[in-house]
Image (cartoon, rainbow, N blue to C red):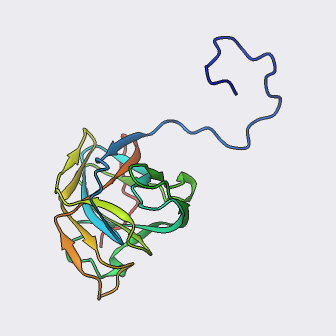
């Protein structure tokens, strides 16, 4: 393929369709990738302003190897549910090729459970890895756009993998990453209240 796009049609167009369906670009909301510390996991809340469907996440992982990632979501805020796996719904569980410091590691859309969220909903998010390699920032900052408010100033990091009672929860930490989503007009949430 050419580095510079052509303004003319190809002299040799393909005769067979692509094996991979094309995907429309997604809306996104990104935090900074400041990343001054790593942890096993992070929990934070998001408030939905306009109806969206969460398609996938981009993470800031301190590794360039294959890493196992789990993403959970719950209706309502995460506080009080840090060690309660029954309150959470699994959205993603797979190994991904991590891209390293200051680079986004996008989780594959086809493996991520697409989740519709309605205006006015508060949602808890939990991202956990089997190693302490998930970058976060110690400066608590909220991030928002016209569709979502990421309530990161009340976020927390988790000192171990999963929901283990022995994991310590450290408050006022900011997740580093990107949410990829589509906007939609009609709304019925796909996660059940807990």
Give above or below for 64 relative to 104.
Answer: below
**107 left or right of 74 in image:** right
Residue drawn at 62 percent across, 19 percent down: 5
Q: Residue at 42% across / 74% down in the picture? A: 131
Report x, y in % for residue 22: 62, 38
Where in the figure is residue 162, as x and y percent of width and height?
38, 78
In depth, the one of 24 and 10 nearer the eye is 10
Q: Position of residue 121 (x, y in %)?
A: 25, 56
For residue 76, above or below residue 105? below
User: For the N terminus, which image quadrant?
Assistant: top right
Between 142 and 146, the residue placed more toward the observer is 142
Depth order, front residue of 109/176: 176
Image coords of residue 6 (percent x, y): 65, 15
Above/below status of 170 relative to 51: below
Identify the residue shown where x is 45% and y is 39%: 26
Residue 83: name its quadrant.
Answer: bottom left
124 relative position to 25: left or right = left
Q: How many marks?
A: 0
């Amino acid at each position: 393929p050419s580095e510079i796009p052509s303004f003319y049609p190809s002299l040799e167009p393909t005769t067979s369709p692509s094996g991979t369906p094309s995907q429309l670009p997604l809306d996104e909301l990104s935090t900074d990738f400041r990343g001054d510390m790593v942890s096993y996991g992070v929990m934070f809340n998001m408030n939905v302003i306009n109806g969206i469907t969460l398609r996938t996440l981009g993470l800031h992982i301190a590794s360039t190897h294959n890493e196992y990632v789990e993403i959970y979501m719950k209706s309502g805020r995460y506080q009080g549910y840090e060690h309660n796996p029954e309150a959470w719904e699994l959205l993603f569980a797979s190994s991904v090729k991590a891209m390293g410091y200051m680079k986004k590691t996008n989780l594959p859309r086809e493996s991520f459970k697409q989740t519709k969220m309605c205006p006015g909903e508060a949602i808890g998010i939990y991202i956990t890895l089997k190693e302490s390699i998930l970058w976060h920032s110690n400066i608590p900052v909220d991030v928002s756009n016209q569709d979502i408010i990421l309530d990161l100033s009340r976020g927390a990091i988790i000192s171990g993998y999963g929901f283990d009672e022995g994991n310590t929860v450290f408050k006022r930490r900011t997740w580093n990453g990107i949410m990829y989503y589509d906007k939609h007009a009609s709304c019925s949430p796909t996660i059940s209240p807990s």
